[in-house]
Image: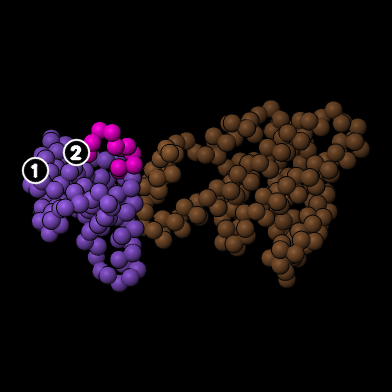
Amino acid sequence: MSDPLEVFVRLTGASGPCAGWMPTYAQWLAPHVPEITDRFYERLLAEPETSQILNGRVDALKATHNAWLRDLLGGHYDDAFYARQKQIGKTHVIAKIPPLFVAASFSILRALIFQRLQSELESREVEDQGHKCTRALGRLLDTCQFLIDQAYEEDRMERLSSASGLSRPLLENLISLRQR
Amino acid sequence: MREQVLGSILDELDGSAADIGASAIISLDGLAVASSLAQDMDGDRVGAMPAAMLSLGDRTAAELSRGTLEQVMIKGESGYVILIYAGKDAVLTIIARKEAKLGLIFLDASRAAKGIAAAL
């Protein structure tokens, strides 16, 4: 099978015409990175279960999150960028962050980023670009989330293979058996 | 050529005891290499299940300090399924009747497994 990332990008059109606008939107949003991060962590800290995971590490995590957002809004989406996103996925797995929180975090982040973006579009009087903008950013975030999800799936398969002794090809065969 | 050799080993095994209903050679990835199983059996399942069972048996034997796995035997109300390694890369699956004399079947299975390992 082809590289899943390539297929994902092709299917979603993440590298399509809208992507060309990303550096511009990214530039508009870049100054707001610390604010987005602060609001993001406010939300996570308001929930007891996520707060427990973050406990005592918030400042360090905020710094990492700021760096990630700057990278995301850096406007350079090459192989090295995607390799970094894959690594972020692995880091989440190693840190044992439940996938539920990753999905919820992306949802919160989308809302915060789109909200900020809307303000930027309005202040620049270019609201008509809103759809291109949200589409491009949304696809970029979807791609990042896909790569993190893949890291979780890879980890689960590896754990299952290691615990059961079933080879990866055999596991794939079992998964693809027709349902009765 | 290899298919013919494997097929003839299975034919010989099936003919060695009336209690053996059918047999198959499965790769450890769960693909059927050769088989005398009935046509109406789902080939994908027939391949994947024995390979999975043998791998699990292998791991269970190791975890419970039972040494190297020799065979996995499944007993159902209609008979037995016996799984043994045929070399490092294949599983010999034998379907036997419920009245089967298992000692003889194990002997024939062991001989067949050695032949299969040599042929693969």
Please name the colour scheme applied to the rendered image. Answer: by chain
The answer to which of B67 and A37 lies nearer the viewer is B67
Q: Colour of chain A?
A: brown
**What's the amino acid at mark 2?**
Ser
Q: Colour of chain B?
A: purple
Q: Secondary structure at mark 1?
A: helix
Question: Measured from the top left, where is residue B11 in percent x and y?
Answer: 11, 40
Question: Measured from the top left, where is residue A13 in percent x and y?
Answer: 63, 30
Image: B107 above or below B17: below
**What's the amino acid at mark 1?**
Gly
Give the residues drawn in magenta, as a range. Answer: B34-47
Residue A159 in magenta stretch? no
Query: Where does label 2 land, which residue?
Result: B36
Lateral position of residue B67 relative to residue A122, left or right: left
Residue A73 is at least partly visible in this image: yes
Q: Residue at x 9, y 48 (%)?
A: B17
Return the chain for callout 1: B
How many callouts does the rendering have? 2
Question: Measured from the top left, where is residue A98 in percent x and y?
Answer: 62, 58
Query: Where does label 1 land, which residue?
Result: B15
Residue B66: name its quadrant.
Answer: bottom left
Question: Measured from the top left, where is residue A136 in percent x and y?
Answer: 72, 35
Residue B36 in magenta stretch? yes
Q: Residue at x 19, y 38 (%)?
A: B36
Return the chain for callout 2: B
